[in-house]
Amino acid sequence: MDGDFWLFVAVGFAAQLVDGALGMAYGVISSTTLLAFGVPPAQASAAVHAAEVFTTGASGASHMAHRNVDWKLFRRLAPAGAAGAALGAYVLTSVDGDAIRPFVTSYLAILGVLILLKALGPPARPRQPGLEVVPLGAVGGFLDASGGGGWGPIVTSSLVASGQAPRQTIGTVNTVEFVVACTASAAFLIAMLSGHWEEAEGLADHAWSVAGLIVGGLIAAPFAGYLTKLIPTRTLMILVGVLVLALAGFQTVKALGWI
């Protein structure tokens, strides 16, 4: 068994605990870790979304069982998120991995900063979400597929700030993420089978890493919600932001050849 398996079990477990508590960060943490290990951006995003098919399915089932899903919001977010994810996957598989890596790393670093600002800043003035839900879902899906993460930080935080109840928002966004992950994975698979994606051959080299993310995420999914009772949300968001920035910084230092 590959030595990276157990490392990614731990990464998947921790990422899913945070994602279940906040409705965000599984993709950001997992993809940034893969990038730090030298995985090309498109392969990292494909690997994370393959893992998320399993982990978001388990998480979504848990939220549905606890009646945390706003189905009216789900019906508006899911089609938009799926469309954005398909486009994001197509764009990511159309460009050279080495060329896009600095942009993806920068994007993830920006997400880390946004999470910290959200945690440390004053609460936004609440208002009920309106027509912006559909474009928000499309943008979230696109950035999630093209960057390997971002659906939760963008969509969950925006909806909570607009006045949605946190419990239903987290449950709904997590459940919609299953649709987004399935769409992105299907788009990556189509690109691979059609020959559109030239770097697809390297995916097999990271099979154990993906398996670790799946196992760790599945173990954590049923228990992630309980984390909110132990650690304040603001503290969790600070920890996520610091972790993402640290991993993005490591990737940057590695790209510059300093290590």
Image: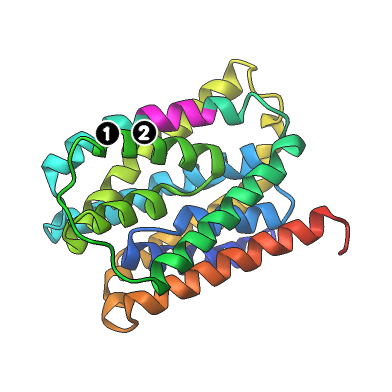
Q: In the image, 238: left or right of 229?
A: right
Q: In the image, 235: left or right of 207?
A: left
Categorize mark 1 by other alpha carbons within 10 Å: few (<14), some (14-19), many (20+). Answer: some
Three-letter amino acid code at the position of disc 2: Ala
Q: Is residue 58 visible?
A: no
Q: In the image, 196: left or right of 217?
A: right
Q: Nearer the viewer, residue 207 or 33?
A: 33
- In the displayed orientation, state which residue is furthest to the bottom: 230
Question: For the point 32% across and 38% down, which residue is it?
Answer: 137
Question: For the point 68% across and 27% down, which residue is it?
Answer: 95
Residue on which disc 1 sits: 134
Three-letter amino acid code at the position of disc 1: Val
* Residue 178, image x, y percentages: 33, 43
Main secondary structure found in the magenta portion = helix
The answer to if 165 sits in the magenta stretch is: no
- The magenta region covers 83-89
The answer to whether marks 1 and 2 mark residues whose Cβ atoms lie closer than 8 Å is yes
* Residue 47, image x, y percentages: 56, 44
Q: Is residue 257 above or below residue 224?
A: above
Q: In the image, 11: left or right of 249?
A: left
* Residue 85, image x, y percentages: 43, 33
Q: Which of the 4 image quadrants contains residue 120? A: bottom left
Question: For the point 58% across and 48% down, which residue is it?
Answer: 107
Residue on which disc 2 sits: 138
Q: Which of the 4 image quadrants contains residue 147? A: top right
Question: For the point 19% across and 41% down, which residue is it?
Answer: 74
